[in-house]
Amino acid sequence: MKIKYLTLPILMLAVTSGMAADLSPASRTEINALLNRLASSGCQFNRNGSWYTPVDAKTHLARKLDYLIEKKQVENTEQFIDLAASSSSSSGKNYQVRCGTQQAVASGVWLKGELQALRAGK
């Protein structure tokens, strides 16, 4: 008995469900401006129970942003705040921002307020 092998073309489908598109240049510019505001704010940044300088906070969040961009998991500034800048991905603890003698606030709240001011041209 002779066996015949059939060669069938392989169909490749791109699965996009659950994957974000690339971050637009406009959103990247907006996030960079937001991170620069944080770095120059003079506010301290709490991550996993320790307080950091605003420059250290910017560096940390920029690394998280780069990771999300590489994994195509962020499309816009709001997603960046929610996915990277609001809580620790390792511990799940919320980040906080403390400016001067004011009480610390959730970093997501602080960053969204700064984003509104940025978009309003302030």
Image: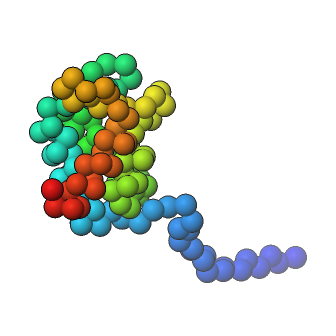
Q: Position of residue 85 (x, y in %)?
A: 35, 41
Q: As displayed, is residue 109 above or below residue 6?
A: above
Q: Splitting the image into 4 quarters, where does residue 8 fall?
A: bottom right
Q: Is residue 37 above or below residue 75?
A: above
At x 20% / y 56%, what residue is drawn? 118
**Residue at (38, 23) in percent of width and height:** 48
Point out the residue furthest to the right here: 1
State the image coordinates of residue 36 (x, y, percent, origin top left). Answer: 15, 46
Q: Which is more toward the observer, 93 or 25?
A: 93
Q: Against 6, is 63 above or below?
A: above
Picture residue at 24% right of the left edge, 66% below the top = 26
The outermost residue toward the left is 40
**Colour mapping used in the image:** rainbow
Q: Nearer the viewer, residue 68 or 46?
A: 46
Residue at 16% in and 45% down:
37
Task: Let me know if residue 56 appears in the view.
Answer: no
Image position of 101 with respect to 13: above or below? above
Q: Is residue 61 left or right of residue 41?
A: right
Quarter the C terminus occupies: bottom left
Q: Position of residue 31 (x, y in %)?
A: 25, 54
Q: Between 68 and 75, which is closer to the camera in this rendering?
A: 75
Q: Quadrant of the N terminus?
A: bottom right
Image quarter of residue 38: top left
Q: Position of residue 59 (x, y in %)?
A: 21, 37
Side (left or right) of 102 relative to 15: left
* Furthest residue toward front: 102
